[in-house]
Image (cartoon, rainbow, N blue to C red):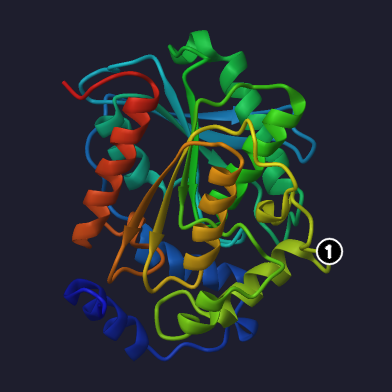
Amino acid sequence: MPPTKEVQDLLDLINSVEMPPLADQSVADVRAGYAQLAVQPGPEVATVRDVEVTGGPHGPFGVRTYTPIDGVSTPGCLLWIHGGGFVIGDLETADSTCRVMANEAGVVVVSVDYHLAPENPYPAAIDDVVTALDWVVANADELGIDPTLLAVGGDSAGGNLTAVACQLARAAGGPAVAFQLLVYPAVDLAENHPSRQENGEGYFLTQETMTWFGRQYLGGRDPATPRVSPLLASDFSRLPPAMVITAEFDPLRDEGFAYADALEAGGVPVERVHFDGEIHGFFDFDFLPDCAVARSRAAAAIRAAFGTAKG
């Protein structure tokens, strides 16, 4: 099917704007441009608190905690890892999504402001996410959560970091993650999957952008390692149950399909949620109708993983 009307209107607007090549822009300008598009007002929640996390190998970083407006329906937690190619995005661009997920899932949400490339290239981002995961467990009482009811989720680059963090937690023997939410995850930076060619131009996320992100993040390092490309892992068993959300016109569509296949082959329960007519980024764009649908599906999956129903 063609892009939805709302998506086509957005694409027409984006494609009508004359922008210099990414290589000709400063990182600060790219971040500012993304913030103009991605920062949106979110619903009211009960509490929002910014905290500095220390003890990681790359220095302090921030997390933001959210408690739902109607109170927690289960003492669970979603650790949310924003997207942005490991280069752009922050607590503000993820704020609306985190507010919605807290309210709809009825859980505490902890959003991670991990160090960004190119100032802090690989492995800074994944090291911060692992540190944040440990921090959540260590501060479970203060957060008012049960550390055995822990979900990790993220979109795009955040989906990459979610997948890697779950693999590393399994290898380390903990923390125990009950569920992983992978929203159009970038799980293979080493291979050129067909959808990267089919959807690599004219659908918001472009091949040029992905190449630029990869260059900033890796700094010349090899992408063909599971800590960068989790699809290349040799063992997918004993990983947390997953929801994998994909979009028809997303360059990352096929690697999302492939990661779901790999998880299922490893005996991991997977719920696949595919949106025809959608593009990369739709999970964060409140003005697209499918955004609310996808967030509701994700929240329902978290509640199910934690054994609660929406009441």
288, above or below 95, in the image: below
Q: Secondary structure at mark 1?
A: loop
The residue singled out by tag 1 in the image is: 221
Query: On the rendered image, what quadrant is the N terminus found in?
Result: bottom left
Query: In the image, 190: left or right of 30?
Result: right
Query: On the rendered image, what quadrant is the C terminus found in?
Result: top left
Q: Residue at x 73, y 58 (%)?
A: 119
Whether residue 48 appears in this view of the structure is no
The kind of residue tagged 1 is Arg
The location of residue 68, given as percent across then percent down, is 28, 26
The location of residue 304, given as percent across then percent down, is 33, 26
Q: Residue at x 65, y 62 (%)?
A: 188
Q: Residue at x 55, y 32 (%)?
A: 240
Q: Residue at x 19, y 59 (%)?
A: 289
Question: Of residues 299 and 33, which is closer to you in this image?
Answer: 299
217, above or below 138, in the image: below
Question: Of residues 95 and 204, which is closer to you in this image?
Answer: 204
